[in-house]
Image (cartoon, rainbow, N blue to C red):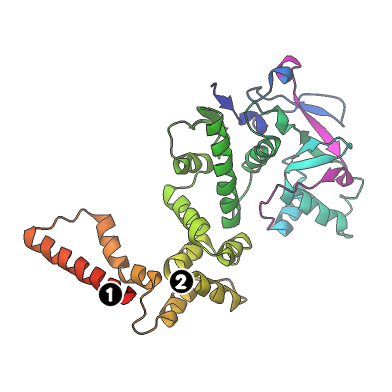
Amino acid sequence: MPKFNVKKLQGLGEELAKTDNVQTGTYKVGAGLLSEVSKDKNIEDDIIYLKKSQIVRNENNHYSINNIDSLAWSISVFGLIQPLHVKRLENGQYKLLGGERRLTAIEKLIDDETKDNWTEDSLIRCIEKDPDDIELPLDSNAKEFLSIITTNKEARKYTDADRLMEIREWKSIIESLRKNGVDSITFPTQDGDEQELAIKGEATRDIIAQATGLSRGSINKFEKVEIQGSEAVKKAVMEGEASIHTAAEMVDLLSKEEQEELLNGTKEKVTVEMVRKKAEDSIQEGLITPQRFQKDTKEILKILKKEKIILNEQEQKKYDDCISTLKNLLCEKES
């Protein structure tokens, strides 16, 4: 199976072709992801200018929208530096692929009666793209999401909610690529350069780490929350009510019921300190839970992760006796 190039989606590093027509221009980008039909037609990414009413938001774009006031000020003073990325629909409107924050900021400027440089009739600079031209064995939804990932990669400060959502989608994309025998793809880095993203023979966690720029330790936290966390904890991360670090701490120290109790009992953003206090308050005399056992053995695990511990014969016997005693104690209570 050939390698595939995702760089075409970004439209980075290309200059507008010189033109006397203020309404149109052209971004010329590599054809690495174009279908054979598109290559034959020498497809180029067109710069187009649209009114706000012509642009519809994308239901598949779940990235966070924040810091709009500062972005609106920047657009008001300096103009729209980064164009929006859109896909033409059959009804003549355009679906947004990248630029949710920029569009939200523009809408804020249009609604601001003190600003006269943005109105409903103002033309917004956009790059027209078609995710279906991506030459990868993915369905239309996966191609669209891959396009959303790459266009949002250009200029965005990621929240934990953004990262959790991206990791979920990357897992689905990687699974589809594997099923269709794709060995690798060429994918843009945070700086806009290209990197080869190996699919075959690589662990999913390592692929996601390379694609997102996250460390394996960070991805472990996200996966822990995704797999072991309650729905309330995952919702809290997605809504910005808890950081991924705090959410991972909740998974480690609290049962799912306790996680929900903590989240439902406060209107503030949950902190690690709140989680640890809840864990201490939840400990009943003589009650051993998985969370308490994990807490009790936390320091031991830290030591084992730092260095290799080698016991002599006498120490090994003491260790085995301790483990056997603990196991027998808990098994007796279970019966």
Q: Is residue 49 magenta?
A: yes
Q: Secondary structure at mark 1?
A: helix
| Outermost bottom residue | 285
Does residue 199 appear left or right of residue 40 in this picture? left
Q: Is residue 101 above or below residue 95?
A: below
Residue 209: tell me if it is visible: yes
Q: Residue furthest right?
A: 121
Residue under pointer 1: 332
Q: Between 177 and 9, which is closer to the camera in this rendering?
A: 177
Q: Is residue 122 left or right of residue 332?
A: right
Q: Give the residue at mark 2.
A: 254
Report the span colored magenta: 39-66
Horizontal side of residue 160 vs 22, given as left or right: left
**Label 2 crowding class (10 Å Cα cut-off): few <14, some 14-19, many 20+?**
many
Q: Given this view, does label 2 or label 1 mark the residue nearer the observer?
A: 1
In percent of the image, x 87 and y 43: which residue is there? 54
Q: Residue sitting at 69 percent across and 22 percent down? A: 35
- SS for tag 2? loop
Residue 276 in percent (x, y) is at 44, 74
